[in-house]
Amino acid sequence: MRVTFRPSGPLWRHGDFLKLWAAQSVSDFGARITREGLPYAAVLTIRATPVQLGLLAALMLGPSLVVGLTAGGLVDRSRRRSVLVGADLLRAAVLAMVPLAALMHWLAMTELYAAAFVVGAASVLFDIADHAYLPSLVERELLVDANAKLSVTESVAEMGGPALAGVLVQLLTAPIAIAVNAATYLASAVFLAAIRKRENPPPPTARPALGADLRLGLAAAFGQPLVRPIFIASVVAGLFGAFFQTLYMLYAIRVLGFSPAVLGVVIAMGGVGALGGALVFPALSRALGFGPAIIASAAISGLSAMLIPLAHGPWTLAVAMMVAAQLLGDSFGVAMLIGTKSLQQSVLPGDALGRAGAAMRAVVGAAAIVGALAGGVIAERVGVRPALFVGAAGTIAAQIWLLASPLARLRRLPGAAA
């Protein structure tokens, strides 16, 4: 397993992968603007309450449940590139409506709720199809390298996107910042449409009912001993991690006193950490073994969450603690993601990847919805900082499932599933 970011090696000569990489790069960058832009619009323009922010976060996370329940079979029975292009075009159309509503003075929480849900649904569909599409585009021995390269550009987007979002919001308002993202999704669709490799047609199968698709996906994911602990840990982490989705921006702006521009820079530091994470996992895997590298990455990422509610004192100290949380959390979170995605793509059957990924997203999404709403309610009653302590403690506890799993004995990436 060799990962190289110099312009050499087989993936640098793989034209279709480069187009996929370009499509994801441009849409990842814009997506960060929207991810921050919707809460910015809610906090700064509409003066949303914690409960309203909890509902907004739940609607951004909710599509993982709704789409996860319905899209797995669609992805496995469709040409996955067509699904990717369609999701991009839908996201572009919906986001273009937000600045239009603002210009017409119609923008309210209702519009933000609708945009959050529809764009979130299209994004989940895109992610499920993309996860299933990559193994058909590159060879198995290149999967870790491909996932690492895709994570690098996600990291660069994490560095530049939030900082740019903060500046754009401060200078031009949040709806105008969101308009930029619509153009990035159009560009992504163009790159994807240019991929030349033809997909093999999906196997001719009967169209089972929704319940059958979900059962097949859950059986594939939960029945694989190496994937099962990742699945369980993801559910617990999704439940408590959603506290941060709900309260992070409110905490930084109203409790710590950060401006949008400063907050954008703090969040961008997560991109710096994520960029390092794309380089960290291959080194950790060589030193510790594939499974222990996943466990170590997950543990460090989970522990870093506690730095967020601990941030206090002078402004510079608070900024330093928030930056440290971003650097450690995103660095090792991305390292863990590279390992878990490559493992799932390797050991799960190719014709069930869509349904397995969708089922996992559905269960994790359901947990995240509960967590987002619970975070808003708990913050209303006991305060934002205590609620974030609860979220951090739960995120740390989620990693227990990995420690006592077969992952601890996995030395290298297994062979492909039948």
Image: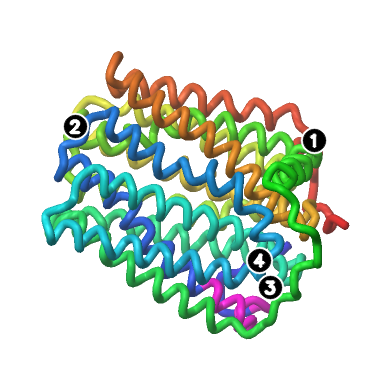
- Mark 3–mark 2 CB contact (< 8 Å): no
Seen from the viewer's position, the closer of residues 131 and 87 is: 87
* Residues rendered magenta in the picture: 9-21
Q: Amino acid at mark 4?
A: Tyr
The answer to whether marks 1 and 4 mark residues whose Cβ atoms lie closer than 8 Å is: no
Tell me the number on the disc at residue 137: 3
Residue at (57, 37) in percent of width and height: 364
Q: Which residue is mark 2?
A: 254
> Which residue is drawn at the image coordinates 74% and 41% (left, top)?
215
Q: Residues within 10 Å of mark 3 (few under 14, many from 20)?
A: some
Q: Mark 3 or mark 2: name the one nearer the start of the chain.
A: 3
> Looking at the rendering, which quadrant does residue 6 occupy?
bottom right
Q: Residue at x 80, y 55 (%)?
A: 349
Give the Cα distance between marks 4 and 3.
Answer: 7 Å
Give the SS element for disc 2: helix
Three-letter residue code for mark 1:
Pro
- Check disc 2: other Cα within 10 Å, few if <14, some if 14-19, many if 20+: few
Compare marks 1 and 2 and give the one earlier in the sequence.
2
Mark 2 / mark 4, whichever is N-terminal: 4
Label 2 – label 4 distance at C-alpha:
42 Å
Residue at 55 percent of width and 64 percent of height: 150
* On screen, residue 89 above or below 32: below
Is residue 52 located in the magenta-colored stretch of the structure? no
Residue 4 shows in this picture = yes
Q: Quick check: marks 2 and 4 in contact, CB under 8 Å?
A: no
